[in-house]
């Protein structure tokens, strides 16, 4: 049997059951934090049914979320019959870094594997927590690596940040301060939002003279933090001022990944290090729109009309990719071509167990041949 009992649960409760009025919704596991959101029933155009009517003026919460609600899963099994897994689902969602490529180097066997899955009529979707590029820019990277992937099949956390703001009807007269790179800026621009910050603030410095008071734009209604190679103290202070002093200002993280693959030679500090700095200075927890939050999973399921039980999530990270799939009720396959080793997976202290694991996605080809 390929299916396993889902053990991750999202529990929510509302203080008002009247959907015709604005009310406060209390959730302990929504997008990665404890927070009270003001809901209104007026979002008929919202593409995400689960987020219908979520209004921008969220209340602050001093609480920190915990990934509670998980019970111990059966140990992951090595993938032995690829055909059985392939035939059991309609859609494969692939992480990119550590699964499709490392840095700018394609992982062996990827093109043939994707071609085989497409030939079997499988829908392929590529989801990455890396926010440095827009979907269009990622499309060019796939093309450069010789992969034929449509822009509509790509979902980066940069896109997720803009999609989330649209889903809550973030006011177009408010601004977004960006601690991150060009991908976030491009997606915000495509979504019609005003923004400031980004790479151009990378060269800015603060002269700490006696009595110096740093000004900030009081019209900033959200701070989006992603991976940022131009991260500096100016950005930390500016973002902190917006979050702490602008009423209702949202703190949004594209992801909290500890490490990333900037090159194929080693691991590099990830976007979680930038987010952590703002958590420390604001004493706030962010809304996380990237994996393992279910926001992108819900978005994809709605956009493509996918039944989540007919999805297999393939990734190299336990705490993002595999948890993302489990939170969404999908089958999960861990590949050992990225950040997770077999010893890490089998460590007694690791509570996140995928349904299956294998060395790399091209094992679909060899394991398929072995079972013929």
Image: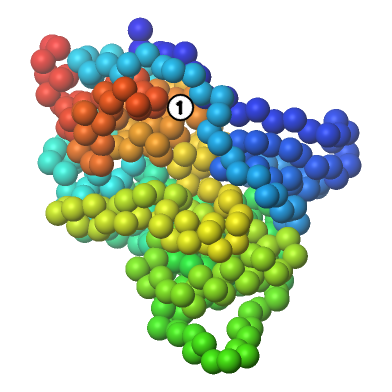
> Image point 61% across, 36% down: which residue?
29
**Which quadrant of the figure has residue 50?**
top right
At horizontal 47% and vertical 56% (from top left) the residue drawn is 276
Front residue of this view, candidates 241 and 367: 241
Q: Which residue does the image show at 65% across and 59% down from the upper left?
A: 250
Is the N terminus in the top left, top right, bottom left or bottom right quadrant?
A: top left
The C terminus - image quarter: top left
List the single residue furthest toward the front: 210
Furthest toward the top, the residue is 1
Query: Number of callouts in the render?
Result: 1
**In the drawing, does residue 184 fall left or right of residue 162?**
left
Residue 366 rendering spot, x and y as whole percentages: 12, 24
Residue 44 in sight in this render: no
Place of residue 225 in the rendered image (x, y in percent of width and height, measured from the top left): 50, 61
**Mark 1 crowd level (few <14, some 14–19, many ≥20, 10 Å Cα):** many
Q: Is residue 152 above or below residue 30?
A: below
Q: Tell whether 318 sits left or right of 362.
A: right
Residue at the image point whose x is 42% and y is 53% from the top: 272
The percent coordinates of residue 131 (x first, y second) are 41, 58
Is 153 positioned to the left or the right of 26 in the image?
A: left
Could you say which quadrant of the image residue 136 lies in?
bottom left
Decide if residue 329 is in sight here. yes
| Residue 78 drawn above or below residue 339 | above
Coloring basis for residues: rainbow
Q: Which residue is mark 1?
A: 326
């Amino acid at each position: 049997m390929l299916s396993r009992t889902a053990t991750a649960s999202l529990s929510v409760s509302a203080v008002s059951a009247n959907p015709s009025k604005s009310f406060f919704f209390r959730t302990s596991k929504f997008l990665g934090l404890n927070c009270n959101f003001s809901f209104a029933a007026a979002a008929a155009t919202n593409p995400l049914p689960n987020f219908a009517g979520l209004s921008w003026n969220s209340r602050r919460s001093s609480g920190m979320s915990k990934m509670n609600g998980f019970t111990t899963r059966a140990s992951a099994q090595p993938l032995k019959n690829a055909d059985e897994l392939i035939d059991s689902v309609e859609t494969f969602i692939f992480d990119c870094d550590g699964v499709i490529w490392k840095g700018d180097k394609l992982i062996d066997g990827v093109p043939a594997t994707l071609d085989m899955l497409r030939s079997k009529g499988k829908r392929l979707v590529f989801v990455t927590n890396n926010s440095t590029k827009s979907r269009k820019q990622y499309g060019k990277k796939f093309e450069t690596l010789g992969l034929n992937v449509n822009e509509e099949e790509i979902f980066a956390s940069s896109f997720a940040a803009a999609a989330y703001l649209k889903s809550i009807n973030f006011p177009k007269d408010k601004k977004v301060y960006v601690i991150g790179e060009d991908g976030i800026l491009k997606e915000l621009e495509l979504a019609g939002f005003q923004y400031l910050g980004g790479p151009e603030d990378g060269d800015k410095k603060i002269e700490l003279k006696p009595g110096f008071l740093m000004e900030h734009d009081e019209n900033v209604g959200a701070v989006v933090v992603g991976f940022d190679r131009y991260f500096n103290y100016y950005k930390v202070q500016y973002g902190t001022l917006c979050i702490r002093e602008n009423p209702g200002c949202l703190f949004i993280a594209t992801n909290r990944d500890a490490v990333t693959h900037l090159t194929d030679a080693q691991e590099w500090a990830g976007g979680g290090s930038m987010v952590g700095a703002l958590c420390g200075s604001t004493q706030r927890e962010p809304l996380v729109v990237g994996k393992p939050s279910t926001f992108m999973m819900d978005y994809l399921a709605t956009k493509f009309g996918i039944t989540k039980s007919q999805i297999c999530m393939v990734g190299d990270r336990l705490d993002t990719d595999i948890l993302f799939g489990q939170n969404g009720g999908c089958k999960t396959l861990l590949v050992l071509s990225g950040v997770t080793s077999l010893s890490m997976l089998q460590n007694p202290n690791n509570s996140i167990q995928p349904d299956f694991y294998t060395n790399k996605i091209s094992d679909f080809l060899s394991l398929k041949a072995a079972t013929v």
